[in-house]
Amino acid sequence: MIKLIKAPKSGLHGEITVPGDKSISHRALMFGAIANGETRIDNFLMSDDVLRTMTVFRELGVNMSQVGSQIKVIGKGLDKFTKPDHSLNMGNSGTSTRLLMGLLSKQPFDLPFFGDESLSKRPLRRVAGPLALMNAKFDLAADNFLPGTILANNNLQGITYDMPVASAQVKSAILLAGIQAEGETIVIEKRPSRDHTERMLRQFGGDITTNNGIITVHQQRQLRGQHVLVPSDISSAAFFMVAGLITPNSELTLKKVGVNPTRVGVIKLLERMGANIKQEPMPSNGEALADIVVKSQSLRGINITADDIPSAVDELPILALAATQALGDTVISGAAELRVKETDRIATVITELTKLGANIEERQDGMVIHGGTTLRALQGSVMLDSHGDHRIGMMNAIAALIAEGNVILTGEDAMSVSYPGFLADLASTMREKL
Ligand code: S3P
């Protein structure tokens, strides 16, 4: 539990290099493990979620070593894992769980797995369903939840799968099974979700075609170890973008942020709200990188609809906070996916921001945020809870910066799921201007 200091009158200033991208760090470990030869991963995200994936592969017999923020993986190929001697602990990590259900769906031994309380409430049928069509076999609690078992299996068949919801986790699970399946596997996406799996499969020498939302893979004989440079995570940088915009007199630079086109929804939505966000691109051999500069500025309410959601799905809590400070209403719809994240983020965003006087109406698939509210601790003092959700914890911290009265944060430990060191980086922007 911590009491957060207010932003100084002179605002937030400085350059921040937020840690490596969570989605890319998970995938770099996975492709490194199934490739042949050595993979080096630079600027790897050393956070609770990604360490779950690393521990799983170590338990499967893969050698992964760490020096600073570099990880070296000695790949084993797809069929040389050794049977772990106990259940795999997925912690809070939906990405580890969903992607590994696909990747490990053709192993000669059963793999029992379990997660924490939050993960055990998150649906898995959306992954197990299409994988079962490929002949993968799972035993899941109530056919949908952890704890469960990825059952031993020696045959996968390609499928054509039209995605009912935009989800990079579901798409990736199918593709990671597809590279081990007989025949062709085709995933059809109406709305593009993050494409890190597709890009990394290609980088590791895999054969994949993508064409207007139709993604095709075949069985891959051999992938080759690579050097992966992980960009700074735009989903982490988003907290500082909004902090810089809504805290008077601020100017913040976020260094070397990953600006993959399937991830930049937060920048586009803030621009639609009237923000002037400067992107300074830089050369990169892998995913696109840019420095991002934000200055405090007034914002206006906008309509955020289903087409906007996949590229900003993790940023909606911090965008909701920005919307409380905008002029007019922001309407978020088509965002029912938020209800099955680490928490029901429609409910937790509203619960926490309402404690500071925000005026938000709940909708089944989103919310309506009436902007222009001066946030203040009602009754002079208020406690904001992360509900064990890293992104709600970080949203609370930014809200506390600009709120009047005493704000105490609880459950702040959850931030280490994606951003250990978030509060220290935030504090570093608060030195009074000289
Ligand atoms: C992720 C995909 C997203 C996102 C999650 C990471 C990934 O989930 O919310 O934090 O790395 O593939 P969905 O694909 O289920 O929307």
Image: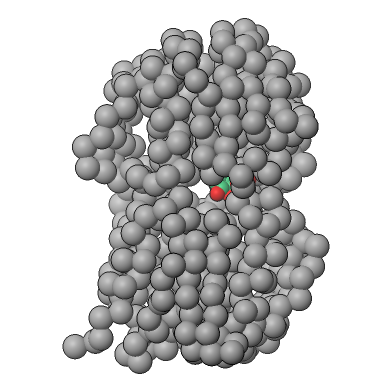
Q: Is residue 172 left or right of residue 393?
A: right
Find residue 8 and report its image quarter.
bottom left
Residue displayed at 42% across by 88% down: 248
Count the marks.
Answer: 0
Task: Compare residues 186 and 356 and report the one nearer the observer.
Answer: 356
Q: Quadrant of the N terminus?
A: bottom left
Find residue 162 and report its image quarter.
top right
Q: Is residue 159 visible?
A: no
Task: Compare residues 150 and 323 and report the one nearer the observer.
Answer: 150
Residue displayed at 39% across by 46% down: 47
Instruction: Identify the residue at the far right of this view.
Output: 364
Q: Is residue 332 left or right of residue 386?
A: right
**Colour mapping:** one colour
Q: Quadrant of the C terminus?
A: bottom left
Find residue 424 and report its image quarter.
bottom left
Identify whether 314 is placed above or below 49.
Answer: below
Residue displayed at 53% across by 24% down: 87
Residue 57 placement (x, y as % from top left): 42, 25
Residue 396 placement (x, y as % from top left): 51, 71
Identify whether 357 is placed above or below 265.
Answer: below
Residue 257 placement (x, y as % from top left): 38, 57
Residue 413 placement (x, y as % from top left): 44, 57
Residue displayed at 51% across by 77% down: 399
Task: Compare residues 187 and 140 and report the one nearer the observer.
Answer: 140
Task: Compare residues 231 and 358 and report the one nearer the observer.
Answer: 358
Instruction: Identify the residue at the far left of this view.
Output: 434
Q: Is residue 352 visible?
A: yes
